[in-house]
Image (cartoon, grey):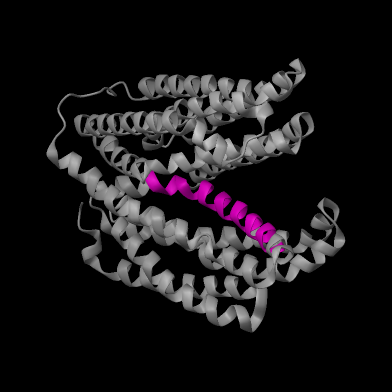
Amino acid sequence: MTAKYLKDTFWNSADFFTSVVVTLVTTKIIVTSVGLDGYGLYSLFNSVISTLGLFDIGSGIAISKYLAEYIPQHKYHEGNEIITIGLIFYTAVGGIIFIALFVLARPLIDFFAIADIYRTEALQVILLLPVIVTASLLQSIPQNVLVAYEDWRLIAWINMIFQCLNLALIIGLVFLGLGPRIIAYLFYGLSVTFLLKLVLTLCFAKKKHPELKLTMRISAAEFFKITDFLRYSFLQYVLSVFLGHPDKFIIGKVFGLEVLGIYHFCSQAFGYMFSFLSNIFKIIFPKLSETHGRQDFAGLIQLSSRGIKYILAAAVLLVLPVGLIWRPAIGIYLNPQFAQTSFPLMIIFLIYLIARSPTIIYYYFYNSIAKPKILVENLIVILLIVVPLYVILTPMIGIRGPVLAQIIATLGGLYHFFRKTSDTKVYTYG
């Protein structure tokens, strides 16, 4: 089992680092070829795609949970019901997004004051965004079938191949010298690659799980399982978005844009490291879901406890080298003054990373037992602690105040998780 965990972790890590490298190279190429204006437009549309992806409202984790539970138990009809619900939901979401963007395309172009040189291309891209978003949402369904089989190597290969394909697409378009039109052609290409990725993932999922098919008969029980899950997942997403931004507004208002720039840079570095931990430890989710399906509650405790120990160790191993190389590395990447100024703040963020790392396991744990309600309760606990601490600590200790407030609030949230996990009623099936 340990050998499998190590292999799965390797493939998830390879997937993550490929994504980071492709993003860095892509950024450099686009900025060089079309300038900051063109890159700004590209970033704007990517932000719109990310925002529209939030219309998932937690359905992806719900589908993943129940497929990981049903497939190992050979409950294929129930699994196909979940797949069909996901297909209907995502298709409906895609239709709503298309209608909304079709109506709002020109007002959006005017709102963002897109330069005349890009207006025609921007209109085309806006109408392509629903295709990309819908294909991405639908692709998550067969991908979650592969997650249920814990085939992380295949998932990583599919992701890495298409990341490299997208990079090759950008290089090819730059080579053709299309000028400002490159943005529109790029998103036409991305529409095709997202659709190809959907088809390829579906083919692999069907080969892995021949019983995969749509069903015209959906039981009320499965329907309400998903809708009940989504009710709390939606609240969880809303609270997460709200918690993710006040610190930056406070820093910008109190200390100005220069200090905000330092804070934002350190916050982004923290975000990359937290995403890395979240990505490599997602391998625990299907196992937790399958264990919950067997109602092996002792096994759930054992798996989650082991996961918390491992992720704390991984966080420490990640933090130590980052702390050691921060000043020389950032000094080379930006300049020595920025590296020296940002270093004390980054140390606080690294402590925050260690403190927050167990929440990743708890996130997967409570989703695996279909209790997103507890995650919502936890976010409310954190919110009630962090907001007054922002007000108290920021004037006292400056730029480090919001991070220290988040550390204290996270510890309060972990105590809430611990109390809930100790309550045997939490593990009740459903």
Residue 179 highlighted magenta (yes or no): no
- Choose top left, top right, bottom left or bottom right for residue 42: top right
Residue 387 on image: x %, y %: 47, 73
Judge from the rendering whether residue 391 lies leftward or rightward of residue 116; answer left or right.
left
Q: Is residue 321 above or below residue 174?
A: below
Q: Main secondary structure of the magenta part?
A: helix
| Quadrant of the frame with the N terminus | top left
Q: Is residue 178 above or below residue 59?
A: above
Q: Is residue 400 above or below residue 372?
A: below
Judge from the rendering whether residue 192 lies leftward or rightward of residue 170; answer left or right.
left
Residue 281 highlighted magenta (yes or no): yes
Q: Is residue 386 above or below residue 233?
A: below
- Count up the numbered dots: 0
User: Which of 62 and 41 lies nearest the eye of the viewer?
Assistant: 41
User: Which of 103 and 346 lies nearest the eye of the viewer?
Assistant: 103
Residue 114 on image: x %, y %: 63, 35
Residue 172 on image: x %, y %: 71, 18
User: Which of 322 and 388 lies nearest the eye of the viewer?
Assistant: 388
Q: Residue at x 33, y 72 (%)?
A: 419
- Choose top left, top right, bottom left or bottom right for residue 270: bottom right
Residue 271 on image: x %, y %: 59, 55
Residue 11 appears in the picture as rendered:
no
Q: Residue at x 23, y 49 (%)?
A: 228
Pick out the residue farthest to the top: 176
User: Which of 156 and 87 lies nearest the eye of the viewer?
Assistant: 87
Q: Residue at x 52, y 19 (%)?
A: 192
Q: Which residues are magenta?
A: 262-286
Residue 108 appears in the picture as rendered:
yes
